[in-house]
Image (tube, grey):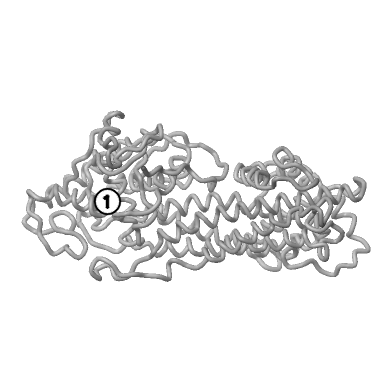
Amino acid sequence: MTILPTNSRTSQVSTHEPLTVTLGSSGVTPEDVVAVARHGAHVMISREALDAVAKVRAHIDNLAHSETPAYGISTGFGALANRHIPNELRTQLQKSLIRSHAAGMGPAVEREVVRGIMFLRAKTLASGRTGVRPVVLQTMVDVLNAGITPVVREFGSLGCSGDLAPLSHCALVLMGEGEAMGPDGELYGTKGGRPVAELLAAHGIEPVTLAEKEGLALVNGTEGMLGMLLMAIADLRQLLTTADITAALSVEALLGTDQVFLPELHAALRPHPGQAAAADNMLRVLSDSPIVASHRINDTKVQDAYSLRCAPQVAGAARDTVDHAALVASRELAAAIDNPVVLPDGRVSSNGNFHGAPVAYVLDFLAIVVADLSSIAERRTDRMLDPARSHGLPAFLAADPGVDSGLMIAQYTQAGLVSDNKRLAVPASVDSIPSSAMQEDHVSMGWHAARKLRRAVENLRRVLAIELVTSTRALDIRSQLSGGQLSPGPAAAAVIAAVRDVVDGPGTDRFLSPELEAADHLVASGKIRAAAESAVGNLA
């Protein structure tokens, strides 16, 4: 039996608002997508959207009964588009399309990804550009609101024509077929198990018998890769601030200077907005630190290492790349992607808007960003563990180096995560394998770009958790070695207090894995940012 995985801890803390999302003909926000995908927000359809959908459907019905063939309405699909399909076979045509295209394999993807796919496709159906009947849109929304989750497999999409296989697995459930998990976690549709139609019936949902054009309208879009992009952006915005905090704590622990973060060195000289924001975050986290103040005079170091001094430049470039990705995502979110599409003047026109290149590219850009952020964080961690570079800290921050290993192997774990992220940074969008008998001879691989980005973001979060454990231990040791005279600043003290709720302070070696996992949960929860902001106010 295949078990659909629960949401991974990729999800960061975020508002659960809005609790209800209303679908109109346009106007969905990234926050709406996250609310539905991750937090189970209830979806409603506006009367205006339903009326627009019904009006366009009436036009499709007229075309379906015309003697003139219309692609996707009275013809086959893809390489089989030249065949005219008689009326008596068109229902079977739609069923065959969905059943054959639901050809995914591998592990089931996360529930939040599936909910994001369904909500985004419902958004497109509500645009009135796809030609479905209102009942199809309503059924998809009803399935979402019932907490029913189609089983979507890891492999199957090439990102052109859109995410065909993932969307087909979702569409199959609307037909009362395929595999799905109920809100109670029970799996339906497996061999020998209870059928999906029974799950729908338990929630008062009638399976849909698809009419002309509707099968194609349910599967021809970029919703899988777009949903994962939107959630990755939400996660990265949270992690970027956390990365500034952990970097600042590492600077403090390594007796680095805060003077390289002064505002006159950033926006005025190099006007990248992300760099200025990251430098300001770090400067504020280091403010009023006795440790920083203690070595401003008579410090023999000329310059800090790049991993400290250049932290705002790297993190800032990451911020700017995320902003670019968010711009692309906002444009895609405003799109109504289908092929063929029903234009406002009634024309039903074939097009290539389903190609995932715009989304695939930024998914790959973000994977590069995540790999580099991971890499610079690991370098700071390594410096804190090396007595030749840590300026007086014990080797590996161990209680009794030689007897104790301290955080030596935590850095190994971090290095393994960083290495994995470097592999995941290899772009998926540069690849293309022709399909559909060379009709679809150039594809985006956007789904694969999205899948690897999700893993990379999880790895980044864990890397930052290890830097957090290391820097807070190093700061505690600094304080102990000075008899309490060299204490961390207010922001660091607040972060250390939050960490000490789940991770013990310096001491002899102990089972480390649970502490690192606890720190990972802490980073995912947003409590590290909240702790720092309690001392210095809102951070960018």
In this rendering, the answer to whether 501 lies above or below 393 is: above
In this rendering, the answer to whether 359 lies above or below 5 is: below
Identify the residue shown where x is 93% and y is 63%: 298
Instruction: From the viewer's side, name the closer residue of 475 and 236.
Output: 475
Query: Residue 354: x and y, percent?
Result: 32, 60
Q: Is 172 placed left or right of 317 in the picture?
A: left
Identify the residue shown where x is 22% and y is 48%: 214
Q: Badge 1: how crowded within 10 Å, few (<14), some, or many (20+)?
A: many
Which quadrant, please, contains the N terminus?
Answer: top left
Residue 336 seen in render: yes
Q: Is 41 placed left or right of 75 in the picture?
A: right
Identify the residue shown where x is 25% and y is 66%: 436
Residue 273 seen in render: no
Query: Residue 68: x and y, percent?
Result: 8, 59
Farthest-out residue, front: 403
Query: Residue 372: x and y, percent?
Result: 61, 64
Amino acid bearing label 1: Arg
Query: Residue 516: x and y, percent?
Result: 66, 47
In this rendering, the answer to whether 252 lies above or below 419 is: above
Q: Is 126 placed left or right of 268 in the picture?
A: left
The residue tagged 1 is 129
Please count the marks in the image.
1
What secondary structure is found at the residue carrying circle 1? loop
Q: Quadrant of residue 280?
A: bottom right
